[in-house]
Image (cartoon, helix red, strand yellow):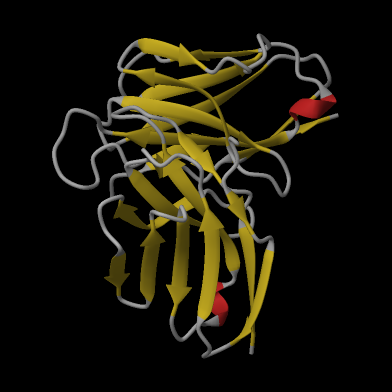
Amino acid sequence: GEDVEQSLFLSVREGDSSVINCTYTDSSSTYLYWYKQEPGAGLQLLTYIFSNMDMKQDQRLTVLLNKKDKHLSLRIADTQTGDSAIYFCAEKRGNQGGKLIFGQGTELSVKP
Amino acid sequence: DAMVIQNPRYQVTQFGKPVTLSCSQTLNHNVMYWYQQKSSQAPKLLFHYYDKDFNNEADTPDNFQSRRPNTSFCFLDIRSPGLGDAAMYLCATSRLSGTGPLTDTQYFGPGTRLTVL
């Protein structure tokens, strides 16, 4: 199908790790992205991974990509209250100029 | 700082009254996008400009139009807003024809929240 799918909610305690999962649909997608959206704000690019990579680490963020299962995850280590937001995964379909297809977003709630 | 700017941040209009939303960018990117995001939903691409070339998504209603007078500015015109057009409208930009891993990555503005009364 067309949809990129994410679970809608995740709740963790401050200091724990958060793992946000995403399944995408197009095996030819070249780049996969994670965006963060705080209330009332636009989308902030967090990180991306190229489709020929399995893992990418960027400070507290770790992205894992399983191309066979079309599964993408974002792990946030030592989650802080400031990480509370909606996290969108997105796949870029097509070559240059290809459109982004977003998941419906996972709302991360971090409790002190 | 190079950025994507949207004005206004909040816009209220009346049912059927034309409204224009504005986006500007200092990134000198050649592609500009408009997305519609309804409450608790994913952003949905309406159209994009690649330089001066306009690319409309097949399911974008005719009620939505866009103009890009120069590289820096892009406008979203809603000719006759209906109640169903109330949403957050997001502008994004990207740079094609470049090199490096972030070429073609989309950078978003803060959005304009449109209310239709």
Please state if A79 lies on the left or on the right of A106 as rendered.
left
From the viewer's perspective, tell me whether residue B41 is left or right of residue A51: right
Regarding residue A82, the answer to whether it shows in the image is yes
Which corner quadrant holds the N terminus of chain A? top right
The residue depicted at 70 percent of the width and 39 percent of the height is B38
Instruction: Give the residue drawn at x 69%, y 60%.
Output: A8
Q: Residue furthest front?
A: A68
Residue in view at x 63 percent, y 53 percent: A40
What count of labels does the image hold?
0
- The C terminus of chain A: image quadrant: bottom right
From the viewer's perspective, is residue A12 above or below residue A35? below
Q: Which quadrant of the figure has residue B53? A: top left
Residue A9, image x, y percentages: 69, 66
x%, y% of residue A49?
32, 55
Observer-nearest of A71 and A35: A71
Residue B114 visible in the current orientation: no
Q: Residue at x 59, y 71 (%)?
A: A84
- Above-or-below relation of B11 to B71: below
Q: Position of residue A100 (x, y in %)?
A: 46, 37
